[in-house]
Image (spheres, grey):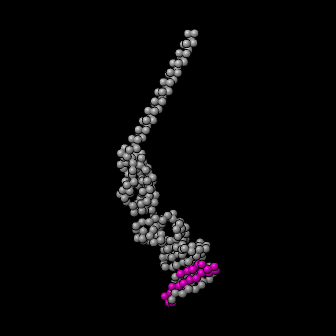
């Protein structure tokens, strides 16, 4: 009988120790959670671990470090852990001449930023610029950019116009002509103006084939005719029309042979 009572007492003591261990573990977890909570609240305060340094890298012709730093300062709304990185990036990305921005934190008080400046390929319309990927961007001095061709088209047409311009530019390398203006008009017709004043009408159908035909006939026009071509219309099915600029006669238009 005494042996049974001893085993019962041992079981009760074991249960008591288990309960104490569980209580101790629970209290430890609660303490850790409370510590983490108060630690998070502390680190979330704007005055805790403030950002003191903004490092900016990039090669700039139009952007200034001071202007970027000022834009970053106005966008920062927290400390090292709580600053809205996307808001900072978007603020700088919206600046004129900024193409792309990357931002990261560097412990304990630094934002490191790399900024890529826009490289204009051409004017877009009358008051904007366009880059190599067909992205249109506006700057205050867009109309003052000299030495750039002018491209234009409808809304959303910039990538298509840029792609065709790059084809033309590549085909003209080493030749006497350079594109000064390329237009995709409301009727989806291509019009080209070269730096010597020559206007070329390609229409809306098969512009690549028509520009290839133009490259074939243009040297012949210069070699065999007494005048200078002022306007060439390649929209004819079996030929092309030429308007001449001549010192001896008024400009006229004639239909030339098969293209």
Q: Is residue 26 above or below residue 163?
A: above
- The tally of labels here is 0
Q: Residue at x 39, y 54 (%)?
A: 75
Residue 206 percent across, percent down from the top left: 61, 73
Q: In the rendered structure, does residue 238 fall within the stretch colored magenta?
A: yes
Q: In the image, is residue 116 above or below residue 143?
A: above
Residue 259 visible? The answer is yes
Residue 116 falls in which quadrant of the image? bottom left
Q: Where is residue 139 in the image (x, y as percent from the top left)?
A: 42, 66
The residue lying furthest to the top in this view is: 1
Name the image quarter holding the N terminus: top right
Image side of residue 223 versus residue 96, left or right = right
* Vertical order, 212 against 71 (above or below): below
Is 244 in the magenta?
Answer: yes
Residue 207 falls in image quadrant? bottom right
Task: From the top left corner, tell me how far across and down residue 155 is, in percent.
Answer: 52, 68
The residue segment tinted magenta is 231-249
Quadrant containing the C terminus in the rendered view:
bottom right
Q: Nearer the viewer, residue 56 or 8?
A: 8
Q: Which residue is drawn at 42% across and 71% down?
A: 143
Task: Please tell me in which quadrant of the rendered image residue 171 appears.
Answer: bottom right
Residue pictured at 45% horizontal, 30% vertical: 28
Residue nearest the observer in this picture, 64 or 79: 79
**Relative to residue 48, is residue 238 drawn left or right?**
right
Q: Residue at x 52, y 87 (%)?
A: 251
Seen from the viewer's position, the closer of residues 98 and 77 is 77
Q: Where is residue 196 in the image (x, y as percent from the top left)?
A: 48, 78
Q: Can residue 227 be seen in this view?
A: no
């Amino acid at each position: 009988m005494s042996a049974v009572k001893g085993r019962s007492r041992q079981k009760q003591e074991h249960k008591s120790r288990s309960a104490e261990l569980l209580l101790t573990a629970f209290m430890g977890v609660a303490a850790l959670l409370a510590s983490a909570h108060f630690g998070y609240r502390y680190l979330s305060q704007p005055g805790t671990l403030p950002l003191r340094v903004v490092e900016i890298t990039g090669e700039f012709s139009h952007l200034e470090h001071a202007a970027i730093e000022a834009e970053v300062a106005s966008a920062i709304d927290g400390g090292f852990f709580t600053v809205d990185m996307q808001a900072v990036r978007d603020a700088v990305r919206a600046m004129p001449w900024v193409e792309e921005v990357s931002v990261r934190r560097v412990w304990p008080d630094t934002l490191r930023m790399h900024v890529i400046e826009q490289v204009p390929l051409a004017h877009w319309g009358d008051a904007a610029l366009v880059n190599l990927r067909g992205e249109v961007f506006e700057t205050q001095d867009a109309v003052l950019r000299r030495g750039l061709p002018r491209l234009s088209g409808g809304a959303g047409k910039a990538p298509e116009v840029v792609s065709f311009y790059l084809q033309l530019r590549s085909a003209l390398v080493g030749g006497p002509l350079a594109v000064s203006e390329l237009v995709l008009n409301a009727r989806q017709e291509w019009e080209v103006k070269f730096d010597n004043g020559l206007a070329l009408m390609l229409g809306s159908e098969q512009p690549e084939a028509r520009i290839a035909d133009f490259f074939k006939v243009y040297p012949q026009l210069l070699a065999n005719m007494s005048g200078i071509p002022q306007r060439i219309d390649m929209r004819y099915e079996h030929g092309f029309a030429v308007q001449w600029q001549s010192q001896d006669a008024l400009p006229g238009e004639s239909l030339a042979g098969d293209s």
